Amino acid sequence: MLHSRLRPLPRHHHRPLTNIDNNNIAISNDRNNDNGNDNGGDETNTEDIFTSFLPHLFPDDAPSFHGDPGQHLLYHSPLYGPLEIMVPTYPIASTCQSDSRVEEIDESRKLFAHFLWSAAMVVAVGVEEAAAAAGKAVWSVDGHTVLELGADVYSNCLTGTALPSIISILSSAAEVVISDHPSSPAFAGAIDFNIVANVPYSLRSRISAHPHEWGVLGDAFSQQNRGRFTRIIAADCLWMKSQHENLVRTMLWFLTPNSTISDGNVEGGFQIDGRVWIVAGFHTGRAVIASFFETAVQMGLEIEDIYERDLNSGEEAGEVRREWVPFREGEGLENRKRWCVVAVLRKAHEN
């Protein structure tokens, strides 16, 4: 199953970043000499071990997120080997803004800001499987420019670990940009650690992280990158209905429009296709997810494909899908947690 790829690392295994500046980021130990083995001491957290077996013990109760603040997880990638992922630690108090709303917002975000979300794993697995299939799948990032969207200031579904971005750059994306709200705790070390721990030095010039607040498009990053990304990832970013319009504005702004580029060597030219990948769990209810898709269509996106995926399927048994519906009769929290919605969006009125 999907969650079997993850296990918590012992607490004493965690390795801090050292020598951090704009041009030099290092980790205290060499990952290649570690391989996730742990033979020293007996500090493995019993709760961590139990948590890693929960999907097997309770198959109908798939977790929406994984990890604790500052915890390190080992993600087992069949294609790229073990990847060590640091979960962000949420700061005691915000140092990024002095706005009166920040304290209230930060209290809300503390509940969810420091997790690896299952939706991010769905994207990561899809991208990796496409790479293994030589790019002949919908999740292929080969040669694409990829933007992973993190949270708006009101949202709690932070990019955090940047796992989809890391898998994307390893899967031959031309360029990957990780974005998150300027106040995100992920910028305090987790993103840097995860890049350096898992991305070869030769690829690091093609992956970067930039602050971005949904719907705020006048900053230098937004102005320089309008229409630049052929793949946009939004994993568990739909839970706050009041921010749906801002999220769609960001998607429309950064997404490459569909167009045909003339090429004398290719009959009819070649197609540039911009797509948004949406994956979202139902942990905050189905209605808010349905509301996002209504807003997206009204504002200029169209749904190319949409379905529901069983979070406890995959690996040996294969992926299990069912039809997406805005309302499912008899659905409650206990039986909706194992499902997520997966959608592919594009700019409307384009062939």
Image: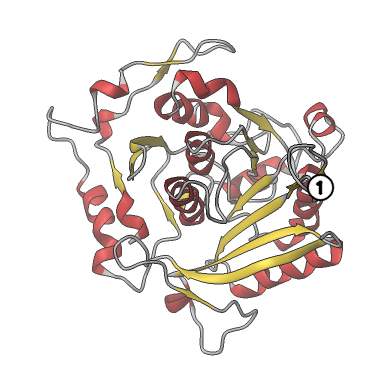
Residue at 58% x, 50% y is: 157
Query: Mark 1 packing: few (<14 Cα in 10 Å), some, or many (20+)?
Result: few
- Residue 123, image x, y percentages: 51, 52
The quadrant of the image that shows the C terminus is: bottom right
Query: Which one is in front, 259 or 2?
Result: 259
Q: Amino acid at mark 1?
A: Thr
Q: Is residue 25 left or right of residue 157?
A: left
Residue at 83% x, 41% y is: 262
Which residue in the structure is indicated by mark 1? Answer: 260
Query: Which one is in front, 164 or 60?
Result: 164
Q: Is residue 296 above or below residue 194?
A: below
Q: Secondary structure at mark 1?
A: strand
Q: Is residue 15 above or below residue 258?
A: above
* Quarter of the figure with residue 32: top left
Residue at 13% x, 27% y is: 40
Residue at 47% x, 40% y is: 167
The quadrant of the image that shows the N terminus is: bottom left
- Residue 71, image x, y percentages: 37, 38
